[in-house]
């Protein structure tokens, strides 16, 4: 069931989370922990790379919502990249593109962070 | 036999027995007074007198017998009572002699001696009764002690000894030689010697039975020993005074009985003192073993009683600490992620706990995991396995590590350490091994129990969530002229948060809502309930879907936690104007079939999910969509559980297939369309688990043709 993994990569003040597998109500707590960890370390510039994510449920989407206010208040942001068409559709249906910056690849997301420095 | 005797006398009062006995003794006293002036008793009177004394004594014995077996007492109580009854015996034997002075029972030569004889007679009567009663009491106590943890042979031996004592009494009478008895018998005929020798042998044999000594703790042993020693002078005085001779003179029967019983008592007293003396040096070790056994039993009790995991592990370390008298001890258990963790400890500071290396592959733990055996290191400086531990815990000198093995796997290690070298011995290790076995069972049981309780709790939660959802969904479809309404929800194992509802706004208007609350289980069910409340109160206030959803968003955003949001559609069907107005807040699109053009379209106006945003973005993006319908048009709403339904190959059902089925059945009733679609999805899912709720709502315009 819990075939979900998060790998973290820090580059300067930006942290990239590579997520893989199924992000649903059962695996969401693991993802929540890794973002919480970043926030505790005061690393508020976060890129989430969706390249290897095959499915995301509403509980998975909820994880982003749980932190975004806090992160943005500290002048940080969560940017998303490398979404498959299927995953993007789920985000799109809910209107997430109106709330988050979703870009095609990781380097672009990092670049956007650097521009706003 | 004892049983029937006991029941026979149960209903008779002791008082009655004592009175009867006293009357008999009084009669004997009167007898004696009557015959005192004479030189001797006539023969038949003599026998009657002895008989009466015997019966009176037996009656006393019965009273004691009944009192004695009333209730089983513990060994300390028995020892204390025994001590005082021996003391009582010696006092009874010595004190009357002191008061009345020495003097034997004899027959008056002249009338002048009568008064002193009366006094003598009284003294001897009291002496005989007291001494005999105390001896009977003591015999019962000896019997108790001899029988303590005994085998059947002991019972037989005791019976034979008592039989020989009775025989001695009878034999004494028949030989009838004794007037001035020195010992049991006066003469030295072979038969007498055999009888006496046998009695001595039997009493000595019985006196070797002092098993009760083993069951005393060190303090009790010392106390009992000195108590016994204290009684020795009393015993010496008892044999020194002419008490027993006086009794013999008074009554031959009692004399022999008392001599025998007193002999037995003395032998047993000496034997007990010797036995206690021999046990004293090993008393503390014996105490320790007893404590070990007790702790093992204690743990067995822990196992059988319902306890929490935390409680069991803390009991394991506290018992270990107690029994091994270690300086500190702790229990490391393998956790779910495979790592070791100290789950319980005794006398271990936070710092020490932190410094204890928890490594399954190295050092002493590594060795235990590899060899699945216990380790005893009596000088850690000479053992390389403890190098790592030594570095962090400098004061450790000796260590004992015992694995907890379940199904051939090491599930944890119990460590005990001392700050001096050679702190543990081989016995400690063996005891700990046995202890660890018991502990393993206890811990595994607690773990299993906790797991099943957790499972039970989850299932209970699921049931509550499921029931809540079922109560929130409408049970009946509203009956609206010219409209076919179909709705159903196929629920997942865990409640997925699907919700739909119909609200009658006025005669011509019907409100329709379909929503999916994020998350699962109980929390999703509670948010559903909250949503239903908000929807039902706002629907009658705001007749525009856009305004309605904006208000719902505002309210929900304030009242749910940030992780939770809701995707929903709100539609108002206006029958007067023949149109449907709706807004989509992040929900799955609406499938619309236009009968006039025979086309199917997917309506997906803009709008983000409810409670994602305080209002700015939500209000700005929300779009209202209006459709003027024709006869036989239909609208189909669903939740993502439909399009995201997965089969065993993890393929998704998808929107295309939904449209395909709908188009294939577009000329049928709404009921048939939804039925066919449901059947197709269920077939698609096959045996794999439904991971989300799946809801369908369809409305088909069926205006009556008879215009």
Image (tube, coloured by chain):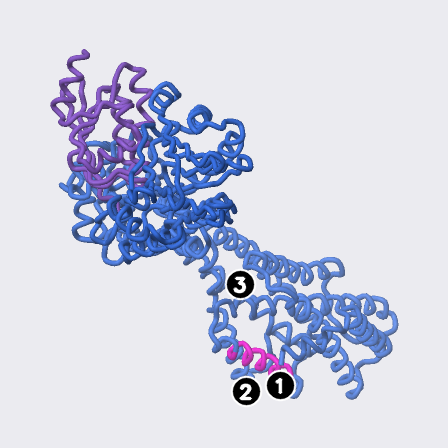
Chain colours: A purple, B blue
> Which residue lies under the disc numbered 3?
B269
Task: Classify B320 as above or below B614.
Answer: below
Q: Quadrant of residue B594?
A: top left
In terms of depth relative to the viewer, which is nearer, B192 or A44?
A44
In terms of depth relative to the viewer, which is nearer, B506 or B421?
B506
Circle nearer the N terminus (3, 2) = 2
Binning the other alpha carbons within 10 Å of mark 1 as few (below 14), some (14 to 19) or many (20 upward) gives some
Highlighted range, magenta: B156-170
- Would residue B131 be found to the left or right of residue B199 on screen? right
Q: Is mark 3 in CB contact (under 8 Å) with mark 2?
A: no
Circle nearer the N terminus (1, 2) = 1
In terms of depth relative to the viewer, which is nearer, B356 or B557?
B557
Principal SS element in the magenta part?
Answer: helix
Q: Secondary structure at mark 3?
A: helix
Q: CA distance from mark 1 to mark 3?
A: 27 Å
Q: Find out whether residue B58 is within the magenta segment.
A: no
Q: Position of residue B363 (x, y in %)?
A: 16, 41
> Which residue lies under the disc numbered 2?
B191
Binning the other alpha carbons within 10 Å of mark 3 as few (below 14), some (14 to 19) or many (20 upward) gives many
- Going 62% across and 86% down the picture, which residue do you hit? B171
> Which residue lies under the disc numbered 1?
B171
Binning the other alpha carbons within 10 Å of mark 2 as few (below 14), some (14 to 19) or many (20 upward) gives few
- Would residue B159 be found to the left or right of residue B251 on screen? left
Q: Is mark 1 in CB contact (under 8 Å) with mark 2?
A: yes
Residue B213's disc is: none
């Amino acid at each position: 069931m819990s075939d979900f993994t998060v790998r973290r990569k820090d580059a300067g003040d930006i942290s990239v989370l590579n997520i893989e597998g199924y992000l649903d109500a059962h695996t969401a707590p693991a993802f929540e922990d890794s973002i919480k960890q970043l926030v505790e370390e005061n690393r508020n510039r976060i890129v989430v790379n969706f390249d290897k994510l095959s499915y995301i449920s509403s509980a998975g989407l909820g994880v982003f919502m749980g932190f975004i206010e806090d992160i943005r208040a500290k002048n940080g942001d969560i940017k998303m990249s490398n979404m498959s068409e299927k995953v993007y559709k789920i985000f799109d249906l809910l209107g997430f593109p109106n709330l988050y910056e979703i870009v095609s690849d990781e380097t672009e997301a990092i670049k956007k962070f650097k521009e706003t420095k | 036999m004892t049983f029937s005797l006991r029941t026979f006398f149960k209903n008779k009062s002791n008082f009655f027995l004592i009175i009867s006995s006293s009357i008999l003794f009084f009669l004997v006293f009167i007898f004696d007074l009557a015959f005192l002036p004479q030189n001797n008793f006539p023969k038949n009177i003599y026998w009657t007198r002895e008989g009466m004394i015997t019966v009176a004594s037996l009656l006393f014995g019965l009273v004691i017998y009944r009192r004695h077996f009333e209730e089983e007492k513990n060994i300390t109580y028995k020892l204390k009572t025994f001590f005082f009854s021996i003391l009582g015996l010696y006092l009874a034997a010595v004190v009357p002699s002191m008061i009345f002075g020495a003097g034997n029972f004899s027959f008056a030569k002249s009338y002048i001696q009568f008064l002193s004889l009366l006094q003598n007679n009284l003294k001897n009567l009291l002496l005989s009764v007291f001494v005999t009663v105390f001896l009977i009491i003591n015999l019962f106590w000896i019997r108790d002690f001899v029988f303590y943890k005994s085998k059947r042979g002991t019972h037989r031996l005791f019976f034979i000894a008592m039989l020989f004592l009775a025989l001695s009494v009878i034999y004494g009478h028949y030989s009838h030689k004794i007037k001035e008895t020195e010992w049991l018998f006066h003469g030295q005929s072979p038969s007498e010697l055999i009888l006496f020798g046998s009695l001595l042998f039997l009493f000595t044999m019985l006196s070797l039975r002092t098993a009760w000594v083993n069951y005393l703790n060190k303090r009790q042993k010392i106390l009992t020993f000195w108590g016994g020693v204290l009684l020795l002078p009393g015993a010496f005085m008892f044999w020194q005074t002419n008490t027993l001779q006086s009794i013999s003179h008074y009554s031959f029967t009692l004399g022999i009985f008392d001599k025998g019983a007193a002999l037995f008592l003395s032998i047993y007293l000496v034997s007990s003192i010797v036995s206690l003396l021999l046990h004293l040096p090993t008393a503390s070790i014996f105490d320790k073993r007893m404590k070990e056994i007790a702790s093992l039993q204690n743990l067995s009790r822990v196992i059988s009683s319902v306890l929490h995991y935390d409680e069991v592990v803390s009991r394991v370390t506290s018992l270990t600490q107690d029994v091994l008298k270690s300086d500190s001890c702790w229990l490391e258990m393998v956790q779910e992620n495979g790592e070791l963790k100290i789950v319980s400890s005794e006398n271990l500071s936070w710092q020490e706990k932190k410094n204890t290396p928890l490594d399954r592959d190295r050092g002493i733990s590594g060795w235990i995991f590899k060899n699945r055996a216990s380790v005893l290191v009596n000088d850690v400086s000479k053992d390389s396995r403890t190098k790592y531990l030594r570095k962090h815990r400098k004061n450790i000198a000796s260590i004992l590590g015992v694995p907890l093995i379940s199904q051939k796997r090491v599930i944890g290690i119990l460590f005990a350490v001392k700050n001096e070298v050679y702190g543990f011995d081989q016995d400690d290790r063996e005891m700990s091994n046995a202890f660890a076995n018991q502990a393993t069972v206890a811990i595994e049981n607690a773990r299993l129990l906790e797991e099943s309780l957790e499972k039970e709790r989850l299932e209970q939660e699921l049931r509550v969530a499921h029931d809540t959802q079922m109560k929130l969904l409408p049970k009946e479809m509203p009956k609206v002229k010219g409209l076919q309404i179909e709705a159903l929800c196929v629920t997942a194992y865990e409640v997925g948060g699907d919700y739909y509802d119909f609200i009658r706004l006025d005669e011509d208007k019907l409100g329709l809502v379909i929503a999916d609350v994020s998350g699962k289980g109980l929390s999703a069910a509670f948010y559903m309930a909250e949503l239903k409340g908000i929807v039902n109160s706002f629907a009658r206030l705001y007749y525009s879907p856009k305004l309605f959803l904006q208000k719902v968003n505002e309210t929900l955003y304030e009242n749910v936690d940030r992780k939770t949001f809701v995707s929903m559609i709100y539609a108002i069907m206006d029958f007067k104007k023949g149109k449907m107005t709706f807004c989509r807040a992040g929900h799955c699109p609406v499938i619309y079939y236009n009968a006039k053009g025979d086309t199917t379209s997917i309506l997906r106006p803009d709008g983000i999910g409810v409670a994602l945003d305080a209002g700015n973005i939500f209000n700005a993006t929300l779009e209202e969509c209006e459709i003027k319908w024709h006869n036989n048009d239909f609208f189909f709403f669903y939740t993502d559980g439909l399009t995201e339904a997965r089969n065993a190959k993890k393929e998704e059902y998808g929107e295309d297939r939904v449209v395909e089925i709908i188009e294939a059945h577009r000329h049928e009733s709404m009921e048939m369309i939804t039925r066919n679609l449901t059947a197709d999805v269920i077939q698609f899912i096959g045996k794999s688990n439904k991971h989300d709720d799946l809801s369908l709502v369809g409305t088909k315009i069926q205006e009556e043709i008879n215009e």
